[in-house]
Image (tube, rainbow, N blue to C red):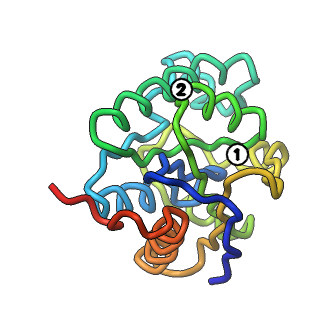
């Protein structure tokens, strides 16, 4: 897996958002990272209002106006968790730069995003294999269409979804340690 070092440095552990389109493995990667770091895990899907879930369940993509309240609620929950525990790992599709900016503003703490990237074929296969998820595979193309690749001025690491989850999390954890100037252990001491 290839991942260029970010030109960002933090004097504390940043809040981590694992992002990407549906089927990229956000929840699996983020929950594994959170467990390793002994930090709370917040799944962005759990913060969607019922109207958003109903809309997506019917195969209707969300519009920007559907996302703003969700991003604000998620950002507030992330800030609270990070302040209470010294960090948090969350998931959020964060497909557009403006969504990432809105979420970062709502959190108000140093943040880094980890974009999980994979081929359409791999993503579709994963979505088709999921059981009991409200997001139908038919929404994959709409998500791919609005995905804005992060620019060099954004604190975003890009990781392939092809390796095993532990390999992805190893790489992400190593990058986070490097970005905090080695001033803190990667694992939280309880």
Q: Quadrant of the rendered structure where residue 184 is?
A: bottom left
Quadrant in the picture for the C terminus: bottom left
Q: Which residue is mark 1?
A: 138
Identify whether 42 is placed above or below 170: above
Q: Secondary structure at mark 2?
A: helix
* 164 sits to left or right of 139: left
Residue at screen point 43% across, 51% down: 131
Residue 102 x/y as whole percent: 67, 28
Q: Which residue is mark 2?
A: 53
Q: Quadrant of the rendered structure where residue 55 is?
A: top right
Residue 32 x/y as whole percent: 35, 62
- Cα separation, mark 2 vs mark 1, equals 15 Å
Residue 172 x/y as whole percent: 51, 69
* 87 sits to left or right of 149: left
Between residues 186 and 29, which one lies in front from this camera angle?
186
Residue extending farthest left: 190
Residue at screen point 35% across, 33% down: 83
Identify whether 103 is placed above or below 135: above
Between residues 176 and 28, which one lies in front from this camera angle?
176
Quadrant in the picture for the N terminus: bottom right
Residue at screen point 32% across, 67% down: 185
């Amino acid at each position: 897996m290839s991942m260029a070092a970010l030109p960002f440095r933090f004097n504390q552990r940043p809040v981590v958002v694992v992002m990407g389109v549906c089927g990229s493995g956000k929840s699996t990667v983020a929950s594994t990272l959170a467990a390793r770091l002994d930090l709370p895990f917040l799944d962005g899907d759990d913060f969607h209002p019922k109207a958003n879930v109903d809309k997506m369940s019917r195969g209707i993509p969300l519009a920007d106006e559907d996302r703003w309240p969700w991003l604000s609620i998620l950002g507030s929950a992330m800030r609270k968790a990070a302040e209470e525990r010294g960090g948090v790992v969350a998931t959020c599709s964060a497909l557009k730069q403006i969504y990432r900016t809105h979420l970062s503003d709502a959190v108000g703490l140093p943040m880094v995003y980890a974009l999980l990237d994979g081929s359409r074929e791999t993503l579709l296969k994963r979505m088709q294999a999921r059981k009991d998820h409200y997001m139908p595979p038919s929404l994959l193309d709409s998500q791919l269409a609005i995905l804005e690749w992060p620019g060099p001025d954004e604190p975003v690491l890009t990781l392939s979804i092809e390796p095993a989850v532990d390999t992805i999390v190893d790489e992400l954890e190593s990058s986070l340690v490097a970005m905090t100037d080695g001033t803190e252990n990667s694992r939280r001491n309880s």
